[in-house]
Amino acid sequence: MKKGHKTHLRAIILALLTLFALAPQVKAQQKDMPEVTIATAVSNLAFAALWVAEQLKYFEQEGVRAKITVAGGGSPCQSAVVGRSVNFCASSSEGLILAHVEGAPLVAIQSHNRALTLSVVVRKELADKFKLTRKSPLNARLKALSQLGPIGATSPGAVSEQIFKFLVTKSGGDPSKLKFVYLGGPQLPASLMNNVVDAFALSPPSAEITEAAGKGYVIIPLGLGEVPELTDYPYEILMARPDYVEDNRKVATAVARALSRAGALFHSKPEAAKAALRAHRFSNPKTLEDKVFELSFDTVKPAIPRWGNMSTEGWKKVINFAAGAGIIKDPAKVPSAEEGLLWTNKFVGKP
């Protein structure tokens, strides 16, 4: 064998030996990482930052191994945290308000969505009848909600119901005249496309699927920030038990930072965030067609904050919505919006 070949062979063998020597160390490092469980209320694109953090392994980069599951609703998600079967719940902030009113020990430590992202969709023939498009004056679109027949919602008292009551009240209508049909989230798109309901409101891509099919039309994509009361508003938040985060500060900081970094990517490198989101199991081309994905992405992106910190002003909006929509029924139980009760920035830090 020639000298050059021998040298090349020795280099390959040395590299392989180094790799084999390092492999147990890498495995040991991964094994030493604390494992956390994160439940999400649902699997829609309101949680886009979470899916990007998972896809790009930001949790591991921050020093934790994250096991992410879908709880199938905000209530079971929060209950799992309260019952200690999961460490964190990613769900909507009005659910935390309700949990607080009921005495559940929960605190928000990060916000990965800063506007209500529900898309209000009506049957396409109704949008045509009312001569409405997304460019129509907001008040004209709001007033049309009072003229609807059955409205689909996930469950009684859910945000998918309360948002219609809030918007109709905002336009001067009477929310008591609205008629709701409670069908669960997965059934709503098909119900609208089959004329069972006239409208519903869910985060993308549920409403956008009906528009791509030519059956529905999104008249109010709230994620774009047209309604000031529901913008600059910590909508999707990461919550945990206060005792857990105090006892596991490094873990709480790692998870909050991973989510915030993923959200920041939507602003610093939007195409990279978009590619990571598209590659994720919940929105890859096998499960979501291009037209629906593009429409959903354009609706959700403006609602994702540059970092996951929160403010008193934002939480005042959450509390006002919860009170105005009937989630808080007793005025005496309206909580404070100041940091320390419902939320804290002590774990999220700065970019």
Image (cartoon, helix red, strand yellow):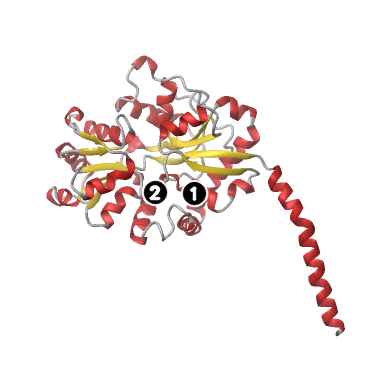
The residue pinned by badge 1 equals: 51
Q: Amino acid at mark 2?
A: Val
* Badge 1: residue crowd in 10 Å (few <14, some 14–19, many ≥20): many
Of 64 and 305, the residue lying toward us: 64
> Residue 269: percent from the left, percent from the top?
51, 56
Q: Quadrant of residue 139?
A: top left
Q: Residue furthest top?
A: 332
**What residue lies at 22% left-to-right and 43% top-to-bottom?**
199
Q: Quadrant of residue 154?
A: top left
Q: Quadrant of the N terminus?
A: bottom right
The residues bearing labels 2 and 1 have C-alpha atoms spaced at a distance of: 13 Å
* Badge 2: residue crowd in 10 Å (few <14, some 14–19, many ≥20): many
Relative to 188, is 10 above or below?
below
> Residue 247: percent from the left, percent from the top?
64, 28
Look at the numbered disc 2 and give the secondary structure of its residue. Answer: helix
Q: Is residue 174 visible?
A: yes
The residue pinned by badge 2 equals: 300
Q: If you read the primary sequence from the N terminus, does the residue marked by circle 2 or circle 1 appear first?
A: 1
> Residue 318: percent from the left, percent from the top?
39, 30
Q: Amino acid at mark 1?
A: Trp
Of 110 and 315, the residue lying toward us: 110
